[in-house]
Amino acid sequence: MNQNSEGSGAVRELIENGESVLGVEFGSTRIKASLITPDGWPLASGSYDWENQLKDGIWTYDLETVWDGAAACFTDLVADVKNNYDVNLTRLAAAGFSGMMHGYLAFDKNDNLLVPFRTWRNNITEAASKELTELFGYPIPQRWSIAHLYQAILNGEGHVGEVAYLTTLAGYVHWKLTGEKAIGIGEASGMFPVDPETGDYDVSMVEKFDRHIADRGFTWKLRDLLPQIVPAGEPAGTLTSEGALQLDPSEQLEAGVPLCPPEGDAGTGMIATNSIRSRTGNVSAGTSVFAMLVLDKPLSKAHPEIDLVVTPDGKLVGMAHSNNCTSDIDAWVGLFGQVAKAFGVEVEGSDLYGPLLSRALEAEPDAGGLLNYGYVSGEHITGFSEGRPLFARNPDSRFTLENFMRSVLFTSLGALRTGLNILYDEGAVVDELRGHGGFFKTPEVGQRIMAAATRTPVSLLDTAGEGGSWGMALLAAYTQRDDTELSLADFLDKLLADSVGTALEPSAEDIQGFEQYLERYHKALEVERAAVANLR
């Protein structure tokens, strides 16, 4: 990547001329905005912290919070621009919006939300997932929008007959900002299966679904409920006056900004790590963790544990997704911070991670016989609709801080590796995984642990830390390319070729240690099941 706009004066002029590009991502715990140059160089950022809520057994976010958070995030970005370049952000060349994939946002014909937003984190659609997987001969994970819709049908929920539009968080935000019910193909592939050959929803599966529910008496057809798929690189609407006001209550942001098709966090992760060609892969590790391997051939059969989605430019991807990753790590680090405070030592939360997590590199390879389950929520890959964080050890386990921290890190990747084993057995091959997310913030630690857990070299991009909002901004920038024949993969290579760091090869000792830990992890899953059944 080249910084073509060196110097604050040149940047100020670029921003004033409306040549900068905006990407915003609604992540699990943070809404982040990234402002970039047309060639991808980060200029400024803004953020807003938020959390999902468990209401009546459903993980959800209030839609009012979506807009409060969007405005607060954009305001933070504007302040960053003003502070760094002494210019007001009023014009943009392009923008794009991303969010957590999957989930269920259902609206009636008057655009009223019918039930609270059901996020990806809910494992409440097991019956629908199994039945649809069998019907389609294609894996339909519990998180997918179609699984939520069909589960609502199975449950006899009265709102289903009123559904007129079904979308995701990214699709919802885009709709409200532009008036267009559009979506990118990568995000669409987490709602309902798509056909990479046509770039649209799989027609045969749509017809199968409609026939399957024909006797229910609904007046709608499935295709009428789903957003239109817009290819990467094409505009998917423009920011309306109302949309501009939603983002910027100060009324400084001008309307008319072209928006690219909205994508999910999986798609922006692939973009941010430049892993959309065959035999490339990336792993995003934060609140959840997922690895995405771009396949060079279809899988031999449907595996319920594996998502089959597509890249933002439509290539088939095998995705192993675990609901739990860093949440339990954060909880333990917080506890150690309280211990330090009890001894009169005040340590900032962010300063705790490096010293604690680095201890894991000094541990015994298999974590000394210790065992953790960081199941804050359910884990579909191992068969859990609910979770109970749990730590266990044998009397003769080596209970040291080093081993404990290694067990906490290892277990955060246990379910992920369980899913990856299925892809490995299917012959999926990647030359290296490109990592991004909070798991990799402590130098070497996350990279080394991930390499051991996946048995694959792991590299980090210098810019991957910018996250999904930056990846979304790159997709928006792609709509403004001069050469309309330039493929998305070539566009990313042009921008990011010099940003990939050296891949860290896993050591034989670390691989063997993780394999031993994983064997213990699988054998003791009944302990976790007993915890779920009895800890209320």
Image: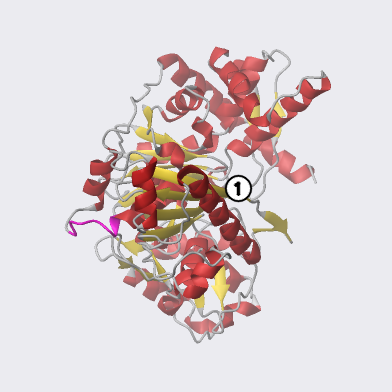
Q: Is 481 part of what is drawn in magenta? A: yes
Q: Quadrant of the N terminus?
A: top left
Q: Is residue 117 above or below residue 498?
A: below
Residue 35 seen in the figure: yes
Task: Give the magenta part as a residue range.
Answer: 478-484
Where is residue 7 drawn, in percent x and y? Answer: 35, 39
Q: Is residue 104 above or below residue 328?
A: below
Q: Main secondary structure of the magenta part?
A: loop
Where is residue 451 drawn, in percent x and y? Answer: 42, 26
Q: What residue lies at 52% left-to-right and 21% top-to-bottom?
A: 516
Left or right of residue 464, residue 75 in this image:
right
Where is residue 487 drawn, in percent x and y? Answer: 21, 53
Q: Nearer the viewer, residue 483 or 400?
A: 483
Where is residue 383 drawn, in percent x and y? Answer: 58, 46
Quadrant in which residue 427 is drawn: top left
Q: Is 406 part of what is drawn in magenta? A: no
Q: Secondary structure at mark 1?
A: loop
10 Å crowding of disc 1: few (<14), some (14-19), many (20+): few
Quadrant in which residue 501 is drawn: top left
Q: Is residue 171 above or below residue 345?
A: below
Q: Nearer the viewer, residue 445 or 63?
A: 63
Q: Is residue 218 above or below residue 44?
A: below
Q: What residue lies at 53% left-to-right and 48% top-to-bottom?
A: 46
Q: Nearer the viewer, residue 493 or 370?
A: 493
Q: What residue lies at 61% left-to-right and 19% top-to-bottom?
A: 355
Residue 311 seen in the figure: no
Q: Which residue is mark 1?
A: 29
Q: How is the image coloured?
A: secondary structure
